[in-house]
Amino acid sequence: MAGHLIVLLPVAAVWVAAAVVADGLPRLDRARALRRRTGWLSALTRTGLALTAAVLLVGLQSAGDTLVDRAATGLALTAAPALVVAVCTVRRVRRLRAGAGAFARAPETPAPHGLRAAGAHPLIGLPLQVTALTTVPAVVSAAGVDLLAGPAVTGPAITVGVLGVGAIAVRHALRHNRLAERAMPAAVDSPRAVRALHV
């Protein structure tokens, strides 16, 4: 077992936990539970960003071949989706938590479909899950399993990864659209259209 696995495991664990919590947000039907879960998600997201940034910054400043240098090399793929999390997801989670807090005075207050649709927005779940997925190759490689050693494996592995990200994106978009449709007010027929035409 490589030494830099000790550095990578906490980072990967936090991102995976954040991805799991984000995936469960749209299933929560009570405002208080939604507010509590968004609090957990906010804490996990900020911790993941802080750990990732710390490893990458220390790795950039160090000139040697230390444990942190090897961990930073493994997390190079994680930098882009983590940046999307920092720019888009953190703000959306904060707004979702504030919205759920407005309804969370009573313990059994149902979460409106609009809040659940906001929790299912692709810019919350997708960046977190992609970030969690990008930590997996680094952890697997640090554990000594060289899955991508051969050039014949690299191409199919990248293809499977891209297809997996695409499937996750489609799932989030469909779930968000379904909940957003429920949040729309029911269409009211105009009485003029129903009335018979008089000449």
Image (cartoon, rainbow, N blue to C red):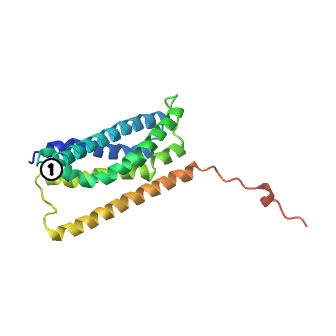
Residue at point 39% right, 49% down? 125
The location of residue 36, given as percent across then percent down, is: 41, 34
Please state which of residues 171 and 68 is positioned toward the viewer in this rendering.
Answer: 68
Q: What residue appears at the point 11 percent right and 48 percent down from the top-left corner?
A: 64
Say which amino acid is labelled 1.
Answer: Arg
Q: Position of residue 176 (x, y in %)?
A: 48, 53
Q: Name the residue at the right extreme.
A: 199
Which quarter of the figure is the C terminus placed in?
Answer: bottom right
Query: Residue at the bottom extreme?
Result: 152
On the image, numbered disc 1 is attached to which residue? 70
Asked which secondary structure carries label 1, the reply is helix
**Left or right, 31 with reference to 14:** right
Q: Residue at x 19, y 46 (%)?
A: 59
Reply above or below: 13 against 161.
above
**Whole-percent x, y for residue 84 in the image:** 38, 51
Comparing 103 with 128, the one in front is 128
Residue 165: which quarter of the image?
Answer: bottom left
**Residue 86 location, x and y as percent?**
37, 46
Viewer-closest of 192 and 5? 5
Identity of the residue drawn at 29% across and 50% down: 132
Give the crowd class for mark 1: few <14, some 14-19, many >=20 residues within 10 Å. many
